[in-house]
Amino acid sequence: MSLSAIVAALAEIEGADATLKDLGLVRAYPDLPKEKPQTPCLIHLPGHGKRAWPATSGLRSVDHHIETQLLLGRADMTAADALAKQFVEAMFDLIDSHVTLNGTCTMAGVTEYQAAGITWGGVSYAGIVFTVTVAERVPVVYAR
């Protein structure tokens, strides 16, 4: 699958999740917002990746590390602390229950998170930056 399809599936799963909605999630953006984002929201950026062809397995391996930014609002982290903790647990549970991201990958998981001040369009937001690691394993067909 393409990185775009994986990110679109991730945003779709997040946007449809009842727990995230109950926490106030307004939108999960599959692409960078063109306007000032409404908060709380999730924004996805391609972080970094690695591609390899192990000689013995016959599988092409692609690992994507997607930076998912949760913008909580124009507040300091002290005011957003309780909500931030709830979002962390909700993101763990959500990705753990959708490990193939609707069939777009072999496995996905939240591998890191960090509280952060995030700036979008010159506006500072309290937030959390998650790293969602996505693994693809695809059989390699060798030409004869």
Image (cartoon, rainbow, N blue to C red):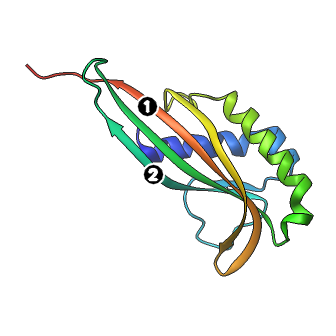
Say whether residue 111 is left or right of residue 22.
left
Q: Is mark 2 on a helix, strand or loop?
A: strand
Up-down relation of residue 38 to residue 60 (above or below): below
- Quarter assignment of residue 110: top right
Camera-nearest label, 1 or 2? 2
Residue located at (83% from left, 53% from top):
84
Callout 2: few (<14), some (14-19), or many (20+) C-alpha neighbours within 10 Å?
few
Mark 2: which amino acid? His
Callout 1: few (<14), some (14-19), or many (20+) C-alpha neighbours within 10 Å?
some
Q: Are marks 1 and 2 in contact (CB under 8 Å)?
A: no
- Quarter assignment of residue 109: top right
Mark 1: which amino acid? Glu
The C terminus lies in quadrant: top left
Q: Which residue carries the number 1 mark?
A: 136
Residue 122 at x, y percent in the picture: 66, 81
Say whether residue 60 is left or right of residue 126.
left
Say whether residue 81 is left or right of residue 101.
right
Q: Which residue lies furthest to the left in this view?
A: 144
The N terminus lies in quadrant: top left
Up-down relation of residue 29 to residue 53 (above or below): below
Front position in the image: 15 or 94 = 94
Q: Which residue carries the number 2 mark?
A: 48
Residue located at (73% from left, 75% from top):
124
Residue located at (60% from left, 42% from top):
10
* Earlier sequence position, callout 1 versus callout 2: 2
- Quarter assignment of residue 42: bottom right
Q: Which residue lies furthest to the bottom in this view?
A: 122
Residue 57 at x, y percent in the picture: 31, 18
